[in-house]
Image (cartoon, rainbow, N blue to C red):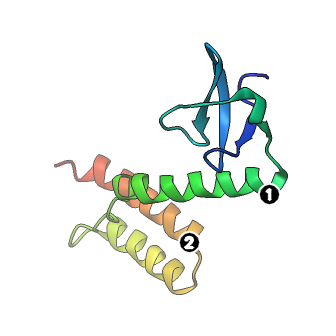
Amino acid sequence: MESGALLYDPATDKVGEYQDRSGPYALLRPVGGGREWQADPASLRPATDQERLSAGVRAANARARTDAPFLVTPPPRPVDDCPTCTELDGLRTVARTEHDYSAETDANVLLRKHRSEAHPV
């Protein structure tokens, strides 16, 4: 077995990434990280495409539940009476109403940059 190979463990009904051997056991780690577990190497088999996909989706969902609250930042607020802030806020509003999330993000980035340069706290 190669390190990193995705294997199905019927004893736990889970797919794990092969890490190494420890005595008579194979050490597997959940896809996406987590606590290793020991498995009987004789019972392991390569994971099917469906099992690999399901394990990847579970890992992505777990990351979204745990990482997202720490990654989301509130959008920058424009400074009153600043023409550049007003213009960038207007661009962001138009992008949001047109559901152009890329343009909305661009406007947020530009507004943050402008605020840090022109209106340092």
Q: Residue at x 49, y 55 (%)?
A: 62
For label 2, the residue is: 101
CA neighbours of label 2 inside 10 A, class few (<14), some (14 to 19), many (20+): few
Query: Is residue 91 placed above or below 36 in the rendered structure?
Result: below
Residue that label 1 marks: 50
Q: Is residue 71 left or right of residue 18?
A: left
In the image, what residue type sits under mark 1?
Gln
Where does residue 59 sit, x and y in percent of width and height? 57, 51
| Residue 60 picture location, percent across and down | 58, 54
N-terminal of the pair, mark 1 or mark 2, is 1
Image spot of residue 21 (x, y percent): 65, 17
Specify the quadrant of the image occupied by residue 86: bottom left
Quarter of the image for the N terminus: give it.
top right
Distance (Cα) linking label 1 and label 2: 32 Å
**Residue at the limit of the structure toward the top, as seen here:** 23
Please state if 89 lies on the left or on the right of 106 as rendered.
left
- Is label 2 in a helix, a strand or a loop? helix
For label 1, the SS is helix
Q: Where's residue 96, x and y in %?
A: 50, 80
Three-letter residue code for mark 2: Tyr
Residue located 28% across and 68% down the image: 78
Along the line of sight, the residue nearer the viewer: 65 or 11: 11
User: Residue at position x 44%, y 56% from top?
Assistant: 109
